[in-house]
Image (cartoon, rainbow, N blue to C red):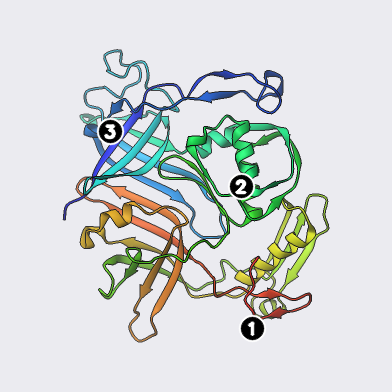
């Protein structure tokens, strides 16, 4: 089976073109934070011919976890010494430095798909068997940049998406490098002092109940909780019986207590603790409390809604599909696989012997590619959309006959 052609490229320029010294809405020398102006990468160095293998991972393992920084590993043939930073004969000298940008793309049927974009953390050389020479790059996406940047400014009350845009504006983040939904929740006015830019935006993500991540093309992406259009599952339904064109090699099922929450105790800044619990769940599984403060919502009622949503979703264990290993080397529909992005919806169907069919409409929570020589494996972690699993909070009890949603 033919494989997509991958492309690995380096940008040898500095990440920024100089210091930004601006007013308090940006970063000034006295504020302990200095942000560089973000330059446009040129991707002048195509290093594909020297790549022996590579892998990437973006996303999280399950829906309750926040997205961590995406990572990639790229193994380079360095027998010529061209990837040795101190080698003055290297065509890349003296530009092989930490935090150089790298991207991975793939071409299939004349269409080129972004796979990963990030920053090289180090250039370590090793010498297998004493005669070979390789450099194994560890690459991390721009969440690392955002975790290093701090914000010192005041923000007014915003919709969640507007707040994330305002934070990115403060950092000088290019408009072309972001894709931000408007948001459904209103977040309060706040004054930040030396606050991690990433931590603040993830607090907004949590209050919204959305998803914040670096997309495969390197764009800062925020997906709010709005349901959007009904998804078309054609080309994104994986089955094990041949009834759909997509198939998988393996699947991971779970039915356990890892995601149980039957008491949520949440408090916004300046608010009163809001408590929602399920006595029925507690009597069966013991108390499973989620306690959080500093929730970025404007009113206690909104915090109560969030607590209700969490207990409504997670107070009972459900049989769930948590992941799959795609079979594109068998079904050959690489375009359907390479086009997938975090938070896409997909349908996964399993026909267990001796029991009923499992069909789960899912969010894609994690996407991993592993491409050793002559192979290409793609794995997905997923979570149920849970559209059918919501409850309604009715002042004093769970109303299990009525669908609830924030």
Residue pointed to by mark 1: 401
Tell me if residue 90 comes above or below residue 113 in the rendering.
above
Where is residue 376 shown, x and y percent of the image? 26, 51
Q: Rate crowding at label 3 as few (under 14), some (14 to 19) or many (20 or more) other CA atoms within 10 Å.
A: many
Where is residue 5 shown, x and y percent of the image? 22, 43
Q: Rate crowding at label 2 as few (under 14), some (14 to 19) or many (20 or more) other CA atoms within 10 Å.
A: many
Q: Are marks 1 and 2 in contact (CB under 8 Å)?
A: no
Of callouts 1 and 2, the N-terminal one: 2
| Residue at the (68%, 24%) spot, across then down | 32
Quadrant in which residue 55 is drawn = top left
- At mark 2, the secondary structure is helix
Instruction: Kindly give the residue lying farthest to the left in the view shown.
Output: 1
- Circle nearer the viewer, 1 or 2: 2
Residue pointed to by mark 2: 161
Q: CA distance from mark 3 to mark 1?
A: 58 Å
Q: Are marks 3 and 2 in contact (CB under 8 Å)?
A: no
Tell me if residue 64 comes above or below residue 53 in the rendering.
below
Q: Answer left or right for 29 relative to 221.
A: right
Of callouts 3 and 1, the N-terminal one: 3
Of callouts 3 and 2, the N-terminal one: 3
Q: Answer left or right for 263 relative to 1.
A: right
Nearest the eye: 274 or 184: 184
| Residue at the (67%, 71%) spot, across then down | 262
Nearest the eye: 33 or 215: 215
Instruction: Kindly give the residue lying farthest to the bottom in the view shown.
Output: 354
Residue pointed to by mark 3: 76
Q: CA distance from mark 1 to mark 2?
A: 33 Å
- At mark 1, the secondary structure is loop
């Amino acid at each position: 089976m033919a494989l997509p052609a991958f492309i690995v490229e380096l940008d040898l320029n500095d990440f920024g073109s100089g210091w930004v010294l601006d007013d308090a809405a940006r970063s000034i020398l006295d504020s302990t934070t200095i942000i560089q102006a973000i330059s446009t990468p040129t991707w002048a160095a195509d290093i594909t011919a020297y790549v022996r293998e590579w892998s990437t991972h973006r996303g999280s393992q399950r829906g309750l976890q926040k997205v961590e920084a995406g990572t990639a590993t790229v193994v380079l043939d360095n027998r010529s010494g061209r990837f040795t930073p101190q080698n003055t004969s290297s065509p890349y000298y003296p530009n092989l430095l930490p935090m150089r940008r790298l991207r991975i793309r793939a071409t299939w049927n004349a269409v080129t798909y972004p796979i990963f974009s990030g920053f090289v953390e180090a250039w370590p050389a090793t010498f297998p068997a004493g005669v070979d020479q390789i450099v194994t790059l560890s690459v991390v996406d721009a969440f690392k940049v955002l975790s290093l940047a701090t914000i010192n400014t005041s923000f007014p009350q915003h919709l969640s998406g507007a707040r994330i845009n305002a934070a990115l504006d403060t950092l000088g983040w290019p408009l072309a490098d972001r894709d931000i939904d408007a948001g459904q929740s209103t977040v309060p006015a706040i004054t930040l002092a030396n606050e991690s830019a990433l931590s603040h935006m993830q607090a907004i993500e949590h209050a919204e109940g959305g998803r914040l991540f670096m997309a495969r093309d390197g764009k800062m992406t925020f997906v709010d909780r709005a349901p959007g259009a009904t998804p078309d599952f054609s080309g994104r339904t994986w089955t094990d019986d041949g009834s759909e064109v997509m198939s998988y090699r393996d699947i991971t099922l779970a039915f356990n207590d890892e995601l149980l929450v039957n008491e949520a105790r949440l408090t916004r800044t300046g608010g009163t603790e809001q408590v929602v619990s399920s006595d029925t769940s507690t009597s069966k599984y013991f108390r499973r409390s989620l306690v959080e403060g500093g929730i970025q919502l404007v009113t206690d009622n909104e915090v109560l809604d969030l607590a209700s949503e969490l207990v409504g979703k997670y107070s009972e264990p459900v049989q769930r599909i948590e992941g799959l290993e795609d079979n594109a080397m068998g079904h050959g529909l690489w375009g359907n696989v390479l086009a997938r992005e975090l938070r896409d919806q997909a349908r996964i169907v399993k026909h267990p012997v001796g029991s009923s069919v499992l069909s789960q409409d899912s969010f894609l929570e994690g996407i991993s590619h592993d491409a050793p020589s002559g192979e290409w494996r793609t794995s997905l972690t997923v979570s149920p959309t849970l559209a059918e699993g919501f409850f309604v909070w009715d002042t004093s009890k769970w109303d299990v006959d009525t669908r609830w949603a924030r």
